[in-house]
Image (cartoon, grey):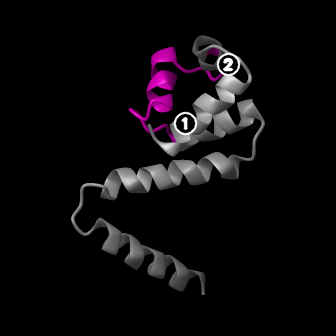
Amino acid sequence: MNDLGLKIKSLREERKEPLRIVAFHLNMDQAILSKIENGKKIPTKKQVLDIAYYFQIPEKELTVLWLSDKIIYEIKDEPYGQDALKVAEQKVNYKKE
């Protein structure tokens, strides 16, 4: 499971809402939402924003988890993934200046 999936599942369980009800309100197939919760599917940005809106939490909270999960998914099996992540962070900081 990934951080985003865990967070979504936690939000849903806090409300004591079944998967099918949340999926219905998100206009999403129940199987897709289940895969997102279990870390087997990365949602689209729109889906992330829809989920944040549904659970009435700041979109930044879920967006940061979504982005970090996407990055990890891309670099986890790369032998130089951590090195690339450090370089990317330097580039982001440089472009901010």
Query: Residue 24 is drawn in which quadrant?
Result: top right
Q: Tag 1, which secondary structure? A: helix
Please report the residue visible at 55 percent of the width from the left and 36 percent of the height from the top: 6
Tell me the quarter of the picture where residue 46 sits. Answer: top right
* Residue found 46% across the figure and 42% down from its top: 2
Q: Is residue 76 left or right of residue 62?
A: left
Q: Which residue is mark 1?
A: 6
- Is residue 38 found inside the magenta-colored segment of the image? yes
29 lies above or below 1: above
**Rendered position, 60 above or below 91:** above
Given this view, does label 1 or label 2 mark the residue nearer the observer?
1
Percent across and percent down for residue 82 are: 34, 69
In this view of the protein, which residue sits in the foreground, 15 or 56?
15
Of mark 1 and mark 2, the one earlier in the sequence is 1
- Could you tell me residue 29's position as x and y percent? 51, 17
Give me the disc on residue 83: none
Eyeballing the image, is 85 above or below 66? Answer: below
Residue that label 2 marks = 25
User: What residue is at 43 percent from the left and 51 percent from the top?
Assistant: 70
Within-10-Å neighbours for mark 1: few <14, some 14–19, many 20+: some
Q: Residues within 10 Å of mark 2 (few under 14, many from 20)?
A: few
The structure residue drawn at horizontal position 48% and vertical position 22%, both measured from the top left corner, is: 34
Q: CA distance from mark 1 to mark 2?
A: 19 Å
Quadrant placement of the C terminus: bottom right
Q: Quadrant of the N terminus?
A: top left
Residue numbers of the magenta segment: 24-44
Secondary structure under tag 2 reads: helix
Q: Position of residue 96 (x, y in %)?
A: 59, 81
Identified by mark 2, the residue type is: His
The amino acid type of the residue labelled 1 equals: Leu
- Using residue 60 as the reference point, say whether residue 86 is left or right of it: left
